[in-house]
Amino acid sequence: MTNQKSPFGKMTLRDLVIPIIKSIDSFNFLLKSHHRRTTIISYHIGRELGLNDIDLFELVVSSGLHDIGALSIQEQDLLIQEDVIKPLPHCIMGHRMLASFDAFQNIAQIIRHHHIKYIESLHFSEEEIPFQSHIINLADRVDVLSNQSPHIMTNITNIIDKITAATGTVFHPKVSKSFQNIAGTDSFWLEIDSLEIDQIFHRIDASIDLNLSMDNIVEFSFILSKIIDFRSHFTATHSYTVAHLASLLGEYFNFSKEKCLKLRVAGYLHDIGKIGINPALIEKPGPLTAEEFNLVKQHAHFTGQILKELNASAWFSEIVTWTERHHEKSDGTGYPYSLDDSRLDVGTKILAFADIISALMEERPYRKKLSISSAFEIIRSKMAPSISLSMFQTIEQHKHQINKLVIKCQVHTFEEYNIARIIDSA
């Protein structure tokens, strides 16, 4: 993995990965911190095995993202059972999501095979099955087993016995031996409970980290958007459409090419906070109750909390502002901060309009999708006054171009979503 000089200041792969690992963990309601804990276990095994810096870095990133292909709560919850019955779909989907990102070629391959049993791996070449996949396979099961007891230290013997019993069939003998070497130290088990993901990344040689270009950021942001959108066919096209629509609207308001790229990234990430929201609320075949709506509203705050860790990059700060404020209104009645017009810039309002247009033109459980004319009529009379009537008047002048873009985005993303569902049902 080689260093590249970023044209917009230093932003590294770990800058993106750390908040994403944290947010994926928040999505799993039954087993919090699974990816953090699996990463810590993998790191210690990798160190014991003497992995070189590059292999160790890729192991840590892969461990932190290993279940990224599990698109629903049901899928993720099945993965925390002691014996995973149907692991292949989420492995394939994780690989598919990440392999398109050049910096993640090796990481995608590790994730593709992270549930492979050792005895099955003997039918493949060593080049096809990365050794790190075997490490994650064992580390993942150690974490699941450790959660069967209220305190990790009281369950050590049981965990070691179960790993030992499956060595040579489920688990790679070398990986199992290294695990047993470190399992006798209290500090290993205590760090599983106490160490933060940031601390693990700080222990890795930073010289092999990758500085990201703008294209890298856009590409990776699209990958992340699918974690949210592909949980429901009602939202499958949403963030992709918002991203491209926001970028187009930016052109109407004379944004630079770079700033339009920022709008695209903001569109991809604007709903990342929904990773902590039960998707059953999105699929509800009727209006939400007041209590349910209050739960859904939390996503804007969660988005800000997840992405604020990226504020170390000045280039990213505007994106964070736009995403966390895209549900605010000029009269102060929006959420989550009840900001008034003086705190809402043009970029925030562009993202708000892109979000609304996309949502109204998508199907929902309780209504059919609306035509652009019906959507614009609702926005003009009910929504634009609390965002910006003058901006919407400009947007309306491009109605036909916007309609073509929305339809194009929906067709493109539904094709990919349908492939994902086929993989999931395999």
Image (cartoon, rainbow, N blue to C red):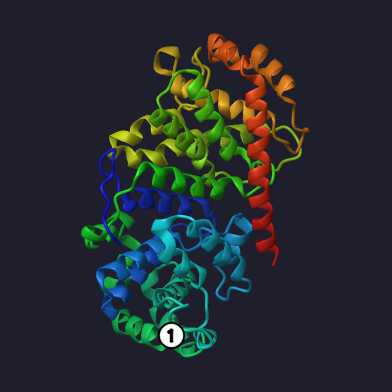
x and y, in percent, of residue 76 in the image: 57, 60
Question: Where is mark 1, residue-wise?
Answer: 172
Task: Answer with left or right where residue 399 lies relative to residue 187.
Answer: right
x and y, in percent, of residue 87 in the image: 59, 70
Question: Dot 1: few (<14), some (14–19), or many (≥20) neighbours within 10 Å?
Answer: many
Q: Determine whether 192 is above or below 347 in the image.
A: below
x and y, in percent, of residue 30 in the image: 54, 58
Q: Quadrant of the C terminus?
A: bottom right
x and y, in percent, of residue 327 in the image: 52, 26
Name the residue rendered at 26%, 73% in the picture: 52
Query: In this figure, what is the number of numbered marks?
Result: 1
Q: Determine whether 270 is above or below 227 in the image.
A: above
Q: Determine whether 109 is above or below 138 in the image.
A: above
Name the residue rendered at 47%, 74% in the picture: 141
Q: Quadrant of the N terminus?
A: bottom left
Q: Which quadrant would residue 229 be assigned to in this image?
A: top right
Q: Which quadrant would residue 151 be assigned to in this image?
A: bottom left
Q: Determine whether 341 is above or below 327 in the image.
A: above
Name the residue rendered at 25%, 47% in the picture: 5
Name the residue rendered at 72%, 41% in the picture: 284
Q: Would residue 331 be seen by someone viewing this image from the given angle?
A: yes
Q: Which quadrant would residue 312 be assigned to in this image?
A: top left
Amino acid at pointer 1:
His
Task: Answer with left or right where residue 233 lies relative to residue 193.
Answer: right
151 or 180, nearer to the observer: 180
SS type, badge 1: loop
Q: Would residue 327 be seen by someone viewing this image from the given angle?
A: no
